[in-house]
Image: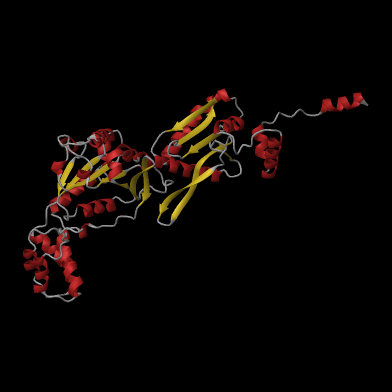
Amino acid sequence: MKDISKQADDRRPVRESATIDSILGAASEETRASLRVLGELLGNEPSSVVPPTQFAVRHLGIDALQLASTKFSGPGTSLAILGNLLRLEMERHAGRVMVGSPGDGLPPTWAQIDIGPEERLTVPGRLVAFFPAGTLAAEPLCISIDDRHWQREFAILSSNAAKPVAERVLKTLQSRLKSEENPLRGRVLEACVNDGCVRVSVSPALHAERSGLVLPEDLWREVDVFLASATGRRELLRSLGLGTNRGLLVAGPPGVGKTHLVRVIASELAGRYTTILADANSMRHHVADLYAESDTFGPTLVVLDDIDLVLGHRDGSGDNTGLADFLATLDGVRQREDILTIATTNDPKSLDPAAQRSSRFDMVLTLPKPDEACRARILRRHLDPLGLPLDIPALATVLDGATGADVKEVIRRAVLEYGDQFTQSQLVEIAESGRWQAALNRRRYL
């Protein structure tokens, strides 16, 4: 009997040895859960708490000395958007991807990206994910993400032999940052400093039309020249090797429409360019990080409002570190493409001349106070709907020296005092009294 049984065994077909990956890939979720419990009973750490490198070694089926790491280095916003791309890949290959701990015995955690006033995306924050062969790439890979401000790491873990594959995958993910898969691309963002690095959040869209700002026609022509590098002349500039970056310094006293002009330009570039509105802290201490965000969004419009309050003059006293960083950053911007910079200032003379030279700010646009004809146009825009018998040219003369904001405030005061019915003399009296202006009480109080 023994001989017959031995002969029968010899006739059985020989099966190829199955790998761990193939066994686990064919197993149900219930079977995997049972295997994890058995592993813990046998004294092994559960995969949910082991460090990412140990997790990768275990699932890639390699020795620890064969493990390679391909890391991403970029701005904090890129890390959040890469987390969103990781989420998309995990959903695309759901059922085959295994998730592990970010280390220190912590469970996988998720973070949120604000993409609107009441709209948020939940994305991987700190975890490691295993992608079997045939999912993310032909080779098995692990992706580790850690969004803590002192860590901020995105890495693809692979075998040494598969490192070129990991590098190609990372390059593909970086290119996808500038695609429609980036939920912040083409929006208006506000930049501020949080936990020592620049963070961006969604700001309400900037809607403004040229008809809402009265400027001389020659200034509008200069604005069109500035915008040409982003529109009609973009490809020609690129083909000639002249670059598509431009800098515009908008100068003028308060109330002449500098902010409105910025809104007009941002509105006309909406969707094609991502607008980043920088606060004073990010301008002063993290200006390089501001411009690095263009690696996350592609074509970028950086707005530096009241730049004279942040960047001084080398002849002045105080710390000029912000100025030095700013100049060095604008020089480095030339290595990127499709970056527009708009800065506003009340006094261009307060800026160091080096900040105004070509390749930093190519154009300086000074907005004047409106002349009599422009003041009349502003008056007509706001008063004509009331249908009142007013002498607009005479009112424009009375308001000599007023800015556009001043003219609007005089009209606003008249509406607040008299509603939709007031006379020429009442409007003139308000203009001449000066009570429409904000007056500071300079008396002393205990």
Residue 392's place in the image compared with 292, above or below, is below
Quarter of the image for residue 49 reads: top right
Question: Residue at the location (9% across, 67% down)?
Answer: 433
Can residue 279 be seen by looking at this rendering?
Answer: yes
In the image, taking residue 73 as reference, residue 423 lies left or right, namely left
| Residue situated in front as seen by the camera: 300 or 319 | 319
Q: How many marks?
A: 0
Query: Coloring scheme of the render?
Result: secondary structure
In the image, taking residue 44 as reference, residue 333 lies left or right, namely left
| Residue situated in front as seen by the camera: 430 or 100 | 430
Can residue 273 be seen by looking at this rendering?
Answer: no
Farthest residue toward the bottom? 421
Q: Position of residue 263 (x, y in %)?
A: 26, 53
Image quadrant containing the C terminus: bottom left
Quarter of the image for residue 395 reads: bottom left
Image quadrant containing the N terminus: top right
Q: Position of residue 252 (x, y in %)?
A: 15, 50
Residue 414's place in the image compared with 315, above or below, is below
Farthest residue toward the right? 1
Q: Position of residue 270 (x, y in %)?
A: 31, 51
Question: Residue at the location (53% across, 44% down)?
Answer: 109
Q: Position of residue 20 (x, y in %)?
A: 66, 32
| Residue situated in front as seen by the camera: 107 or 278 | 107
